[in-house]
Amino acid sequence: MPYKMTKAKNKSFHVLVTGGAGFIGSHLCEALLSRNYRVWCVDNLYLGREEFIEHLKSNPRFDFRNLDLLDKPKLESLFGEVGFDAVFHLAANSDIQRGVKDHSIDLNLNFLTTVNVLEAMRSAGVKTIIFPSSSAVFGETDDVLTEDYGPMKPVSFYGASKLAAEAYISVFVGNYGFNARVIRFPNVIGERCTHGVVHDFIKRLKNDSSRLAVLGNGKQTKPYLYVGDLVVAILLVFDRASDPLEVYHVGNEDRTSVAEIVKIVLEEMNLTGIPVEYTGGSGGWAGDVPRFQYDIGKIKSLGFKQSYSSTESVRIAVRRILETPWL
Amino acid sequence: MPYKMTKAKNKSFHVLVTGGAGFIGSHLCEALLSRNYRVWCVDNLYLGREEFIEHLKSNPRFDFRNLDLLDKPKLESLFGEVGFDAVFHLAANSDIQRGVKDHSIDLNLNFLTTVNVLEAMRSAGVKTIIFPSSSAVFGETDDVLTEDYGPMKPVSFYGASKLAAEAYISVFVGNYGFNARVIRFPNVIGERCTHGVVHDFIKRLKNDSSRLAVLGNGKQTKPYLYVGDLVVAILLVFDRASDPLEVYHVGNEDRTSVAEIVKIVLEEMNLTGIPVEYTGGSGGWAGDVPRFQYDIGKIKSLGFKQSYSSTESVRIAVRRILETPWL
């Protein structure tokens, strides 16, 4: 990692990673363990899977707890048991489409879990929270999104629940001396991903490699970031952000179209030449924001540099997914 | 009222006013009845008082229901019973200081009630909601606040709960064809107010007219708006806003200091000359935003014009409070 570590290096630095058995959470746990932190991974295995952290369980500095953050007594008991130095609150429903069908999913798993975590932290005197948010807080706009951009008009329950959580975090910073780092994630891809277009294409082709059906016309473009680069960004913000409440946008500045993703997946699976059937239309679903563009100048000024462009991220993600056993 | 009414004028236009027995809600019910609307007033009497609507109960176009919006079955039953044309969702904990002591108050009464109302509306096919929000969604800033201002960093649970509610409203507009008018209120004063500095001074002086103790140094300044002007603004937005999701800031452009309020209250109560004891300091409390400044150009462009400046609003409010029996 190219940046200087400024936080405590000693073995007794205790961090809680909620959603630690999830796609991004499990990668973050690895990175925190590589710093010799004491890592407590909490997950209710809603999207996370125990097999994602199986390789970490032999590490004496790693503990896994199957715990639902909506269970306040159990959560408070954990905070009573361990004196955490920081909380990486990654637990969430990250699958926007799931939340379209049942509004209570994002309300409970993204917003009310966050309120519970904040209250447990306050009771226990834990002051540092790292919180993943999303471009979905802004809704639909063609503007370049700085961290301070307004208005915020989400169109998905996912985005609304993340905005609600950001609002509550702001209050804990303003009133209880919290330090919060809100990191608005881009589309993140890599091994152990549990949903999304790359995941879906590979899964479908593993089931039936004779053809690929694709929603839309293939022209939808989004910026993708490889999960390894995201973890570097999270730790960079954790190390270097200084104000009590800091928001960072993380992402790639280029974009990749669905058609390009199809091409990369077929190439990496040695399936070029099979018929690809586009259903036509924009391919979006309710709550989807077809395009967004982050201004990432702020995190760059901390020293962030992606290892992979958006299209390179797609290729490395596809390779890593195919090399690993989880899909 | 100076503007043209464009909505249905017929007697069968059914409106729901949640929080209709509250300070602002009761004034709004009066105005809606004067339009010959059929008004359903719902209140759990948390801050509202039945005596605030006693004078409306003889009106055959008025109905009062003591109903808690957190009681989803009862709420849905009401929506099944009455085919509402529009919902003025004023129910809330409007007392920011109350929410400082118990975080669940604003979460439940401002945010979760709104989610319930939105879901009941969607189930019943009701599409128009008028929602009061607040400058508290922005937190502390010296900038002039346009409707699209960012960032939004609330410092009170009241502000956070209103921002969370705004976020959910945005999703219902984006996905279910709702029309929403979010009106960010200023400090509103007038007869039937249930808290706030004008209320507190008069109440204290009614108990003990020999002296007045005042928190702070008297220099804190805020813009105040008389409740009658606010109701005009609400109906103006209701009549004239046209886009599916419209946000308006309403307020006065001048401000009034605490010392000026003290002077006006003492003058109107014929108590000039009694000792006024300032405790010193800024006088703020946790979650209080000492000053804010709305840009109100947008509502002005609809034709809004205040009848009273901020300082005139204070005087008319004090007079009306003293003329009426509720404090």
Image: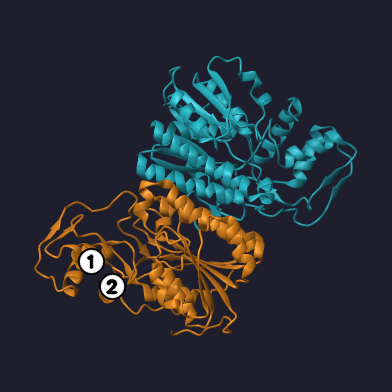
Chain colours: A cyan, B orange
- Residue A232 is labelled as none
Which comes before the other along the chain, label 2 or label 1? 1
SS class, disc 1: helix
Q: Residue at x 86, y 37 (%)?
A: A272
SS class, disc 2: helix
Across and down, in percent, residue A120 comes to: 45, 35
Question: Mark 2, chain letter?
Answer: B
Answer with left or right where residue A266 lies relative to residue B141: right
Question: Mark 1, chain letter?
Answer: B
> Residue tagged by mark 1?
B202
Q: Quadrant of the N terminus of chain B?
A: bottom left
> Residue tagged by mark 2?
B321
Q: Nearer the viewer, residue B216 or A186?
A: B216
Across and down, in percent, residue A274 comes to: 89, 40
Q: Quadrant of the C terminus of chain B?
A: bottom left
| Residue A152 appears in view | no
Q: Residue at x 21, y 62 (%)?
A: B204
Q: B270 above or below A313?
A: below
- The quarter of the picture where residue B265 lies is bottom left
- The quarter of the picture where residue B178 lies is bottom right
Q: A141 above or below A69?
A: below
Q: Residue at x 42, y 26 (%)?
A: A7
| Residue A172 appears in view | yes
Answer with left or right where residue B280 lies relative to residue B40: left
Across and down, in percent, residue A55 comes to: 65, 19
* Image marks 2 and 1: residues in contact by CB distance under 8 Å: yes
Q: Amino acid at mark 1?
A: Ile
Q: Residue at x 68, y 34 (%)?
A: A193
Across and down, in percent, residue A211 comes to: 88, 41
